[in-house]
Amino acid sequence: MSSVPFHYLDLRAFCYVTEEEKRVEEAVRTLLPEGFELQRTASEGHYGDRILVLSARVENADDLRTVLDRLEGFSEDDAERFLGELEERVDQNCSFFMTLDKQAAFRDEIRLGDGITVQGKVEAYPAKKERAIENLETFVDRIT
């Protein structure tokens, strides 16, 4: 992959008290470069239950390429769904949002779903939503 369509990507997953931290961490690491540091933030749910937030910001171009290369595992159905939802996934500030299936990621599969939030800033010159969407469409065409 040559060009990187993002300035940065933020990944985040919640590890609930009913989940094994190591498994949730493995799911997130499926997307990250080897040895990438995860931030851990302790939080509390509505009923006082423990929630651990695992997060990472990827900014370096080589690290971004690694994350994007791992997204090449998208199925054709997910790629079509993703493209059909781009209007809702990109805002006027060229910010991007999607969620991936945490359980699938643990199995080393990349699918749209719930559990791992991916947010980022799309490179677009000029910085307009329409241009950001065009860049993402080009990116998805390359990975499918």
Image (spheres, rainbow, N blue to C red):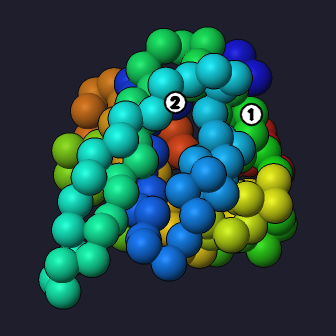
Instruction: Kindly identify the amino acid type of the residue bearing the numbered disc 2.
Output: Pro
For the question of whether residue 29 can be seen, the reply is yes
Where residue 5 is drawn, which disc sits there?
Answer: 2
For the question of whether residue 122 can be seen, the reply is no
- Quarter of the image for the N terminus: give it: top right
Judging by the rendered image, the residue that carries numbered circle 1 is 69
Q: Quadrant of residue 56?
A: top left
Pinpoint residue 33: horizontal percent, then vertical percent. Answer: 66, 25
Whichever of callouts 2 and 1 sits on the residue coming sooner in the sequence is 2
Residue 8 shown left or right of residue 77 in the figure = left
* Separation (CA) of disc 2 from disc 1: 12 Å
Q: Residues within 10 Å of mark 2 (few under 14, many from 20)?
A: many
Instruction: Decide: is 91 above or below 60.
Output: below
Q: Residue, x 35% and y 41% (percent of image)? A: 40
Instruction: Decide: is 129 above or below 49.
Output: above
Instruction: Decide: is 105 above or below 18.
Output: above
Instruction: Kindly identify the amino acid type of the residue bearing the numbered disc 1.
Output: Asp
Give the mark toward the camera: 2 or 1: 1
Where residue 8 is drawn, which disc sits there?
Answer: none
Which type of secondary structure does the marked residue at label 2 adopt?
loop
